[in-house]
Image (cartoon, rainbow, N blue to C red):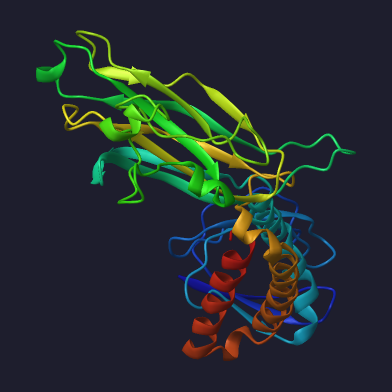
């Protein structure tokens, strides 16, 4: 390991600790070098003395570069920004492609009254503007139900997906004589002619007779999987929407749910509950970018005086910035 002082046109001094290997460039009196140290490496162009213009590979140790004189900061910081800014832009791009996705990885049905239920999700969805080419929807992507192979030798009843807006929650289920509310049609309700025994009780919404939306799938004999068709349900009214997977057959046991549903608002795949905070997080992301640029400019300026406390503060700033841009 050796140390060499290098003077550049700004009349300040860089003290570099390095091990000589090889490099290419026109260095005049200073021979081609590659500076190597510990495990982290960066490649940047620089100008040292008027006889040299080229690039070097620097793998710094602690400390590899001691900045003696603040005039060296603009050149070193400019080189660092070439690599920091693309990372910041990449982090900001995450916000654009964020999805509101509900994934199902083997969830099991649980008993609720006389029904067996899996809660598939709940999101606030905003109705699209009719003057713009936007859309809001709930998309069922490869949603399927799995049963044990030992139960595959007979057919089973229907398993249904139920989508409703919270204002229409009373349209799902009912009771025969004002007693306990049931989701599945009982013998008493069937006698009244309001539903079919063993099916989900549904009454049309007063706002839209097509809602709540119910569709399902049945198991065929010798099949261990029943897959829902890929379905996209358009949303035309702003509200809080709920999804449940329900079946009414007590003979259906040990079913597992797999797949995912995608919930989209007009502005993208941002969850509806987060939409009012979009401006806040956007402002905070910009504020953290400004803070990051200012902090690390000072960090580079006083590199030889940095304490462990400043390193911890730098880490907190970086974590805070990524939290804001990837919310």
- Farthest-out residue, right: 131
Is 103 on the left-hand or right-hand side of 46?
A: left
Residue 137: x and y in percent read 64, 36
Question: Residue 319 sits in which quadrant?
Answer: bottom right
User: Residue 318 or 230: which is nearer the viewer?
Assistant: 230
Is 92 on the left-hand or right-hand side of 244?
A: right
Q: Quadrant of the N terminus?
A: bottom left
User: Residue 130 or 169: which is nearer the viewer?
Assistant: 169
| Residue 21 at least partly seen | yes
User: Residue 3 or 114: which is nearer the viewer?
Assistant: 114
Residue at x 74%, y 87% (from the top left corner): 69
Residue at x 43%, y 30% (from the top left corner): 194
Above or below residue 16? Residue 39 is: above
| Residue 32 at least partly seen | no
Residue 199: x and y in percent read 35, 27
What is the tally of numbered marks visible in this picture? Answer: 0
User: Residue 16 or 237: which is nearer the viewer?
Assistant: 237
Residue 283: x and y in percent read 75, 70
Above or below residue 231? Residue 70 is: below
Above or below residue 146? Residue 123 is: below
Is 260 on the left-hand or right-hand side of 16?
A: left
Residue 12: x and y in percent read 76, 82
Residue at x 72%, y 39% (from the top left corner): 236
Q: Quadrant of the C terminus?
A: bottom right
């Amino acid at each position: 390991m050796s140390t060499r002082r290098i003077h550049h046109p700004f009349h300040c001094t860089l003290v570099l600790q390095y091990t000589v290997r090889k490099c290419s460039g026109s260095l005049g009196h200073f021979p081609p070098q590659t500076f190597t140290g510990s495990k982290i490496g960066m490649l940047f162009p620089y100008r040292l003395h008027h006889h040299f213009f080229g690039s070097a590979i620097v793998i710094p140790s602690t400390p590899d570069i001691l900045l003696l004189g603040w005039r060296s900061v603009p050149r070193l910081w400019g080189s660092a920004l070439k690599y920091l800014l693309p990372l910041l832009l990449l982090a900001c791009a995450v916000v654009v492609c964020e999805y509101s996705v509900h994934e199902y990885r083997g969830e099991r049905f649980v008993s609720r009254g006389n029904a067996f239920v899996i809660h598939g999700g709940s999101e606030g969805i905003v109705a699209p503007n009719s003057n713009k080419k936007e859309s809001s929807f709930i998309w069922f992507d490869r949603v399927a139900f799995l049963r044990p192979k030992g139960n595959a030798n007979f057919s089973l009843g229907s398993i249904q997906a139920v989508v409703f807006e919270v204002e229409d929650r009373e349209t799902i289920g009912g009771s025969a004589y004002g007693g306990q509310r049931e989701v599945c049609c009982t013998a008493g309700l069937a006698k009244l002619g309001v539903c079919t025994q063993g099916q989900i009780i549904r009454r049309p919404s007063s706002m839209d007779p097509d809602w709540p939306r119910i569709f399902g799938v049945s198991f065929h004999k010798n099949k261990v999987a029943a897959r829902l068709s890929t379905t996209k349900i358009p949303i035309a009214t702003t509200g809080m929407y709920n999804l449940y997977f329900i079946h009414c057959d007590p003979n259906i046991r040990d079913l597992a749910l797999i797949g995912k549903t995608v919930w989209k608002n007009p502005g993208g795949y941002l969850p509806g509950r987060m939409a009012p905070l979009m401006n806040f997080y956007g402002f905070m992301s910009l504020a953290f970018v400004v803070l990051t640029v200012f902090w690390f400019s000072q960090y580079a300026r006083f590199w030889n005086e940095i304490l462990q406390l400043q390193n911890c503060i730098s880490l907190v700033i970086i974590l805070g910035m990524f939290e804001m841009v990837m919310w």
